[in-house]
Amino acid sequence: MAIVKTSDIVGSSPKGWEDAVRAAVERASRTLIGLQEVEVTRLNAKIEGGNIVEYRAHVKIHFLLDEELPLHE
């Protein structure tokens, strides 16, 4: 039986929200195995001097906990 777990992650990028989501997924893939889905829960941005300097994507990463999956080294 597979169990799905969820982790909340915030990704950021100076380019845009899509890149911020991609950054969150890439970061999660370095430490989690069995990634299944990403759910964007919130988007916001940091402003300095009247300009957006950082896009942020708050996401939930869904991944499998399964005895058959190899341990991530």
Image (cartoon, grey):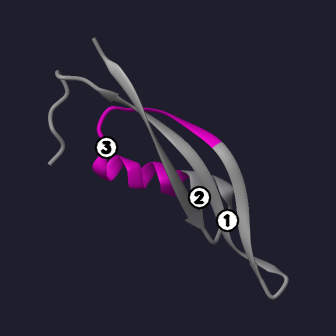
Alpha carbon distance from label 2 to label 1:
6 Å
Identify which residue is drawn at 63% across, 72% down: 14
Q: Which residue is mark 2?
A: 20
In the displayed structure image, the side of residue 63 where residue 8 appears, left or right: right
x, y percent for residue 40 = 63, 42
- Nearer the observer, 55 or 15: 55
Q: Which amino acid, by three-letter code, is at mark 2?
A: Ala
Question: Measured along the vertical axis of the image, is residue 32 above or below residue 57?
Answer: above
Residues packed near mark 3 inside 10 Å, few (<14), some (14 to 19) or many (20 plus): some
Question: Measured along the vertical axis of the image, is residue 39 above or below residue 31?
Answer: above
Disc nearer the start of the sequence (3/2): 2
Disc nearer the start of the sequence (1/3): 3
Disc nearer the start of the sequence (2/1): 2
x, y percent for residue 47 = 76, 77
Q: Which amino acid, by three-letter code, is at mark 3?
A: Leu
Stretch of the chain drawn in magenta:
22-40
Q: Which amino acid, by three-letter code, is at mark 1?
A: Tyr
Question: Measured along the vertical axis of the image, is residue 53 above or below residue 18?
Answer: below
- Nearer the observer, 67 or 24: 67
The answer to if 64 sits in the magenta stretch is: no
Q: Secondary structure at mark 1?
A: strand
Residues packed near mark 2 inside 10 Å, few (<14), some (14 to 19) or many (20 plus): many
The answer to if 24 sits in the magenta stretch is: yes
In the displayed structure image, the side of residue 65 where residue 72 appears, left or right: left
Question: Measured along the vertical axis of the image, is residue 62 above or below residue 52?
Answer: above
Q: Nearer the viewer, mark 3 or mark 2?
A: 3
- The quadrant the N terminus occupies is top left
The image's mark for residue 32 is 3
Q: Secondary structure at mark 3?
A: loop
Alpha carbon distance from label 1 to label 3:
23 Å
Tag 2 and tag 1, C-beta contact below 8 Å? yes
Q: Extreme right residue here?
A: 50
